[in-house]
């Protein structure tokens, strides 16, 4: 029987299946951060349980940590309590913990791949929806709830209903000035925020195969924004080259054995997916969002849809969304003034994103009216930025580098966009208040963010 890549990984991790019910799935690695794990650890204590396989759990704070003055105690009492609680839980249960300031600290979905903790063929979970990021390595990775976090801590297994499969093909080549973030926002706009609900998505096609590992991580990160359970890309030479030599990746003879095994991780020719869609890379322009969900996206030179182009059932929410953003149906947002720019998050906080941003702003100056937060996804990214001299380029252009963390992606720390202000953000969600109460978020890629930071407006970086 011909199998998809998802089927191959899932099937080799099935422990048991409840008749007409969920699958008991073995989990190779779980990541824990400070927000969704406290109740899970409390549940373990109440039941007098130990973590079943502690070597397969990695903990680190990322959501609540500040991005300046990390050498000082966290001032916000709620954030401090959450971070301190994770420290205690990791210590009490004997788990690997990369605390704030540790050289391996950062956003958990950035740190995992860059250290070789995430590998092809694995099943991976975290109490965070953007766990889908790790699927870029050719893995089945998905977010779980707090009760499921406890389940994995206790058994290294989780009960899950088997998702359906979808393949999204991107044929042809991306145009100059179009990033992987633009590709992902384009797909979400076409598929819609609910169009992949219940599916696990495999990305394929010439445009996907040409993406670097970091670009694939961006695409898979955003799978959840169209309702998918997760996303993945078949591992290939780009994957192997990225992983080779990383700290926790196999070494020597074990590496050769692993690569031989990983080369089998691809959908069989003729494997049938429950749903399959195809897009042409040539149709994709730099993207921006105009509303309050990631599916409300358009090419940067396009106009916001007119009200009569929206189906009647969605018109009320469409108008409400535009009212929140201060926009009107049919207008362009190209050239509109903005107040903040955020480069970072588990979507676009990697070294390639900073290279793109720095390359654009080199020889230019930051717009006077703009507040810009440049936040590396990890201390390893921060180190590489400095090693490549990108920090000097940024400083000369009037920018300042902050310290690693989730930052303004979700405003659980001090990096909050004020009410009514507009932020061009490379993060993953533009929900109402996501970046701060009343904040207005325009999602974009690092190149559009760089152009906005220099001009103070929504600007096509190709011009």
Image (cartoon, grey):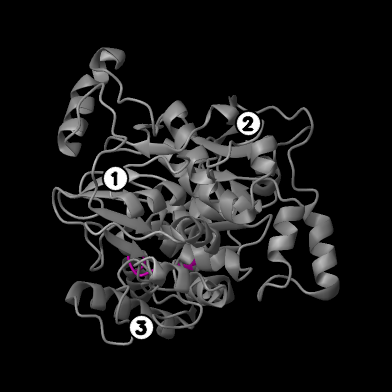
Magenta region, residue range: 31-37
Q: Are marks 3 and 1 in contact (CB under 8 Å)?
A: no
Give neighbour class at mark 1: few <14, some 14-19, many 20+ (Cα, 10 Å). many
Residue 80 falls within the magenta-colored stretch: no
Q: Secondary structure at mark 3?
A: helix
Q: Earlier in the sequence, mark 3 or mark 2?
A: 3
| Residue in the picture at 77% in, 33% down | 2
Kindly identify which residue carries mark 1.
Answer: 457
Kindly identify which residue carries mark 3.
Answer: 88
Q: Earlier in the sequence, mark 1 or mark 2?
A: 2
Q: Residue furthest front?
A: 363
Residue depth check, mark 3 versus mark 2: number of the one nearer the observer: 2
Instruction: Using the numbered discs, state the Cα–Cα distance from disc 3 to disc 1 in whole angstroms.
Output: 45 Å
Rendering quarter of residue 417: bottom left
The x, y position of residue 458, in whole percent, is: 32, 42
Q: Give 134 or 210, whichever is nearer the viewer.
A: 210
Kindly identify which residue carries mark 2.
Answer: 169
Give neighbour class at mark 2: few <14, some 14-19, many 20+ (Cα, 10 Å). some
Residue 36 falls within the magenta-colored stretch: yes
* Horizontal side of residue 215 vs 332, given as left or right: right
How many marks on residues?
Answer: 3
The x, y position of residue 270, in whole percent, is: 77, 27
SS assignment for the magenta stretch, majority: loop
């Amino acid at each position: 029987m011909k199998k998809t890549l998802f089927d191959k990984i899932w099937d080799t991790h099935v422990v048991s299946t409840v008749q007409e019910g969920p699958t008991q799935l073995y989990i190779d690695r779980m990541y824990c951060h400070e927000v969704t794990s406290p109740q899970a650890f409390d549940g373990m204590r109440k039941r007098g349980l130990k973590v079943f396989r502690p070597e397969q759990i990695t903990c680190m704070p990322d959501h609540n940590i500040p991005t300046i003055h990390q050498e000082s105690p966290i001032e916000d009492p709620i954030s401090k309590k959450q971070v301190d609680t994770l420290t205690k839980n990791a210590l009490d249960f004997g788990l690997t913990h990369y605390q704030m300031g540790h050289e391996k600290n950062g956003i958990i979905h950035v740190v995992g791949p860059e250290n070789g903790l995430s590998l092809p063929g694995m099943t991976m979970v975290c109490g965070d929806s953007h766990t889908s990021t790790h699927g870029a390595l050719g893995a089945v990775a998905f977010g779980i709830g707090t009760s499921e976090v406890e389940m994995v801590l206790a058994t290294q297994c989780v009960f899950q209903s088997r998702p359906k499969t979808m393949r999204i093909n991107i044929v042809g080549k991306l145009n100059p000035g179009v990033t992987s973030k633009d590709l992902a926002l384009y797909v979400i706009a076409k598929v819609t925020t609910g169009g992949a609900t219940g599916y696990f998505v495999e990305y394929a096609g010439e445009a996907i195969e040409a993406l670097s590992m970091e670009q694939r991580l961006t695409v898979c990160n955003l799978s959840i924004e169209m309702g998918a359970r997760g996303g993945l890309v078949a591992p290939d030479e780009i994957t192997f080259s990225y992983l080779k030599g990383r700290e926790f990746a196999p070494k020597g003879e074990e590496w050769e054995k692993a690569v031989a095994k990983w080369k089998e991780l691809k959908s069989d020719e003729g494997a049938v997916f429950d749903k399959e869609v195809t897009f042409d890379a040539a149709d994709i322009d730099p993207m921006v969002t105009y509303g309050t969900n990631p599916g409300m996206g358009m090419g940067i030179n396009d106009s916001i849809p007119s009200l009569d182009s929206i189906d009647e059932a969605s018109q009320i929410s469409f108008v409400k969304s535009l009212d929140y953003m201060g926009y009107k149906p049919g207008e362009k947002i190209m050239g509109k003034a903005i107040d903040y720019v955020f480069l970072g998050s588990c979507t676009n906080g990697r070294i390639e994103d900073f290279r793109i941003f720095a390359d654009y702003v080199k020889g230019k100056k930051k717009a006077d009216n703009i507040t810009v937060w440049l936040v590396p996804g990890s201390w390893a990214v921060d180190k590489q930025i400095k090693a490549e001299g990108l920090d000097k380029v940024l400083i000369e252009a009037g920018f300042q580098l902050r310290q690693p963390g989730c930052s303004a992606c979700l405003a659980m720390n001090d990096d909050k966009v004020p009410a009514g202000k507009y932020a061009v953000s490379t993060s993953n969600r533009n929900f109402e208040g996501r970046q701060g109460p009343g904040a207005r978020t325009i999602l974009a890629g690092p190149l559009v963010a760089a152009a906005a930071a220099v001009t103070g407006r929504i600007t096509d970086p190709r011009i």
